[in-house]
């Protein structure tokens, strides 16, 4: 199983709609970085609206992908984090402070635009 | 007092997903709300990953607890691995011997209502319970 990555102008859009096991998560990380390289995308929105569980491993993969994309010159924003996922992560002790987030896809795009124009 | 026991063997990575899916189904059936379902599934994921990383093999056992009027889900994570050397260190936030985030065991304890752990040369057994709110 692979997570589809769509290109829209300078952005890549991802909506995670499958149950992420460790392998799929690692594969996604690799695929996303290749796609950034291939397309020269400057921004990425990863939508988590359909994701019901984020455990410490998946959280680490998400956190890492932000830093990895940043090294390549692309900004990543996560959107649509469910209330239950947000509560569970904080209780688990995972704060993901370095990870930019927005309420939904629309806000995510706005946030990317703002961040990229500042530079 | 009715008890229904089921279990998922943890041998390969995908079994972590199988265990949390089983946990989600049982917690739905027991009437847990969506936030508690997320807490339970995440806790199972952490426990199953510990088995996979440290002991290679083990099992996650689900046990419905009917202690009327309370209904709960008991989850036992059992393995025959090398055991945990330093139990108190393993319960500290940020402690990890595997390069993970170290959120594992103390995080699981916070997500669940009851937490118990035994570890020795013959393996590790972690027992947690979440009570459904009426």
Image (spheres, coloured by chain):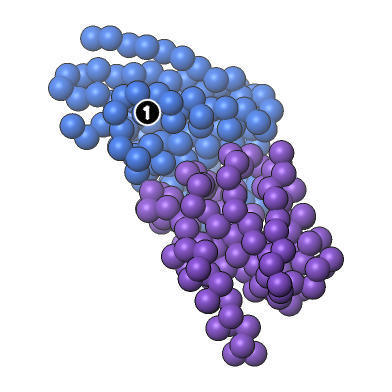
Question: Dot 1 falls on which chain?
Answer: B
Find residue B133 and report its image quarter. top left
State the residue in front, A12 or A75.
A12
**Palette colour of chain A:** purple
Q: Is residue A69 left or right of residue A52?
A: right
Quick one: which residue is furthest to the right in this view?
A: A38
State the residue in front, A7 or B117.
A7
State the residue in front, A14 or A75.
A14
Find residue A77 and report its image quarter. bottom right
Residue in the picture at 58% in, 32% down: B17
Is residue A24 something that shows in the picture?
A: yes
| Above/below status of B91 relative to A63 | above
Residue A66 on image: x %, y %: 64, 66
| Above/below status of B3 relative to B84 | above
Q: Residues within 10 Å of mark 1 (few under 14, many from 20)?
A: many
Residue B54 on image: x %, y %: 64, 35
According to the colouring, which chain is blue? B
Q: Which residue is mark 1?
A: B27
């Amino acid at each position: 199983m692979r997570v589809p990555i769509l290109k829209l102008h300078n952005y890549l859009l991802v909506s995670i709609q499958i149950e992420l096991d460790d392998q799929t998560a690692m594969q996604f990380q690799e695929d996303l970085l290749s796609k950034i390289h291939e397309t020269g995308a400057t921004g990425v929105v990863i939508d988590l609206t359909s994701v019901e569980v984020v455990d410490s491993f998946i959280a680490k993969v998400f956190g890492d992908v932000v830093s990895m994309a940043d090294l390549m010159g692309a900004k990543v924003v996560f959107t649509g984090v469910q209330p239950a996922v947000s509560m569970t992560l904080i209780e688990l002790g995972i704060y993901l402070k370095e990870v930019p987030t927005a309420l939904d896809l629309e806000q995510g795009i706005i946030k990317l635009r703002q961040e990229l124009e500042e530079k | 007092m009715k008890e229904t026991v089921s279990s998922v063997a943890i041998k390969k990575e995908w079994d972590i997903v199988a265990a949390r899916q089983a946990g989600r189904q049982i917690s739905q059936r027991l009437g847990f709300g969506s936030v508690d379902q997320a807490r339970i599934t995440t806790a199972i994921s952490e426990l199953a990953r510990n088995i996979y990383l440290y002991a290679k093999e083990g099992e996650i056992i689900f046990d419905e607890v009917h202690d009327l009027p309370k209904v709960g889900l008991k989850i036992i994570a059992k393995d025959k691995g090398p055991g945990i050397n330093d139990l108190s260190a393993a319960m500290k936030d940020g402690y990890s011997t595997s390069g993970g985030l170290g959120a594992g065991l103390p995080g699981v304890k916070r997500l669940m209502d009851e937490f118990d752990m035994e570890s020795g040369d013959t393996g590790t057994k972690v027992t947690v319970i979440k009570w459904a709110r009426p």
